[in-house]
Image (cartoon, rainbow, N blue to C red):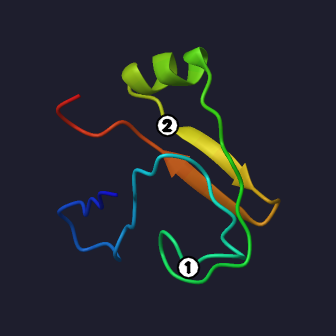
């Protein structure tokens, strides 16, 4: 599992690479106790948009929005 922290004044961004999704209600991996999870599958058109400099917005359980963008150097 790896964690990446961007260089900025923003709050801690926790991103991990794991082998597969897990039941976060049954384990504390990867970030400690959580109350729900959702799998987000990126399609080829999402990758094309990211590579074109676009941002992918993801609706998470109709409560939060996660914005995905491609990091520099990729």
Classify 38 as above or below 47.
below
Please indicate whether residue 15 sits to the left or right of residue 56 in the image: left
Counting from the top left corner in percent of width and height, residue 32 is at 51, 81
Classify mark 1: helix, strand or loop: loop
For label 2, the residue is 55
Counting from the top left corner in percent of width and height, residue 25 is at 72, 76
* The label number, if any, that marks residue 28 in the structure image: 1
- Residue, x 49% and y 37% (percent of image)? 55
Query: Would you identify the image quadrant in which residue 40 lies?
Result: top right
Counting from the top left corner in percent of width and height, residue 33 is at 60, 83
Label 1 environment density (alpha carbons within 10 Å; few <14, some 14–19, many ≥20): few
Circle 2/circle 1 CB separation < 8 Å: no
Q: Residue furthest right?
A: 62
- Residue, x 65% and y 57% (percent of image)? 65
Camera-near label (2 vs 1) is 1
Classify 38 as above or below 9.
above
Q: What is the CA distance from the residue labelled 2 to the residue labelled 1?
A: 30 Å
Please indicate whether residue 33 sits to the left or right of residue 17 in the image: right
């Amino acid at each position: 599992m790896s964690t990446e922290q961007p260089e900025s004044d923003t709050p801690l961004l926790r991103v991990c690479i794991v082998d597969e999704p897990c039941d976060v209600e049954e384990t504390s991996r990867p970030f400690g106790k959580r109350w729900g999870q959702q799998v987000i599958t990126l399609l080829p058109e999402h990758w094309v948009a990211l590579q074109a400099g676009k941002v992918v917005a993801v609706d998470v359980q109709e409560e939060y929005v996660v914005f995905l963008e491609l990091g520099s150097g990729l």
